[in-house]
Image (cartoon, grey):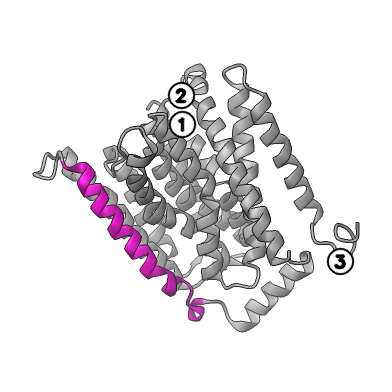
Amino acid sequence: MTALTGRSRVFSRSDLIVFGLTGLATAGSAVVTHGSLAPFLVTAVAVTLVAAMVGRAVDHLADRLGAGAVGVLQGALGNLPELFVSVFALRAGLTTVVSSAIIGSIMANLLLVLGLSFVVGSARHGVLRFSIQRARLIMGLMILSVASMLIPSLAAYIHSPAAGHEVALARVTAVVLLVVFALSIPVSLRRDLEPTAAEGAAEVKQELDAANPWPLWLAVTLLAVAALAAAYVSDQFVTALTPAMNSLHISQAFSGLVIVALAGNAVENAVGVKLAWQNKADHALSVVLNSPLQIALVLAPALVLLSPVIGGPAFTLVFNPMLVTTVGIATLAVLYLISDGESDWLEGSAMIGLYVLVATAFWWG
């Protein structure tokens, strides 16, 4: 019992609550299989809680790393539930859900989660300040990623000579994006983009005061368990998605853009806002922005290359014109707002407002 209570505890009370709820929701997704809405609601909660469990494990794996490393690790592993949801959705032929979920995840993080982080952090600490260099680096890569989605889409919709070769173009683009991501990792881990030594020491002390860090073997084991649970509940979630859409009369576009995106990105939603509340603006910015960056540079290209293997229709980077237009607007808006290295609650509110407008525009499909 000393491992769970007192100053020598390994698991905090909130850890135990998350683990317990995750187990119940995962079991519930296997038991609740009748009806059009109940299975969807249970599995959506299960996906969210599994994502939170992944986030807990990542927090302890990265508790001694800098902002860049935390963001890269959190983004890579935090997107596991969304990767599984996308794979199973492609196998089920729900291509529109997958393409909408990719764009929706990018915009949810860029606008909703980052906006909430700025509102919450600024309300408590005033103007939030962060590394201009890191913000510009991430957003520069985001512009490249958006362009990589725009080019195949334009080639298809304006009937250029490349039209009809979308699959080949998507595969070339996927390889280029994966190479760019690999090249960006050493730069993202640079320590000269971190807060000052005094700020970093204060943050580490605050984290260690909250709870003891997990042993490495424990964090890795729980992460593996969470990954397996993510694969299982994602399959159940996709199975329950179509009956729920039909029952609620929700389009595939809105389901992917809002529902799937928010469920799959629960980790960044919680972690980013929490870090901003603790006045860790650099860490919050890195965690929130690395998630959409890795969706664009890794998850989308991976789906292009995996789609011939997993079955279902081929996945290309040809997106609906409305989708690529809105994500382009969101990227440029966020780049402008964070380019000065500081933000406040008003800018955060503007981001949230833009997200609501985009989501509303897709309500009808």
Q: Secondary structure at mark 2?
A: loop
- The residue at the point 90 percent across, 62 percent down is 6
Horizontal side of residue 177 vs 3, given as left or right: left
- The residue at the point 43 percent across, 56 percent down is 294
> Quadrant location of the N terminus?
bottom right
Sooner in the amino-acid sequence: mark 3 or mark 2: 3
The residue to which callout 3 is attached is 8
Magenta stretch: includes residue 363: no
Q: Secondary structure at mark 1?
A: helix
Give the residue type at disc 1. Ser
Q: Nearer the viewer, residue 5 or 329?
A: 5
Badge 3: residue crowd in 10 Å (few <14, some 14–19, many ≥20): few
Give the residue type at disc 2. Ile
The residue to which callout 1 is attached is 255
Sooner in the amino-acid sequence: mark 1 or mark 2: 2
Q: Residue furthest left?
A: 161
Mark pair 1, 3: CA separation: 44 Å
Mark pair 3, 2: CA separation: 49 Å
- Residue 152, compared with residue 136, is above or below; it is above
Image position, residue 16 (x, y; %): 78, 49
The residue to which callout 2 is attached is 250
- Residue 142, compared with residue 256, is above or below; it is below
Horizontal side of residue 250 vs 220, given as left or right: left
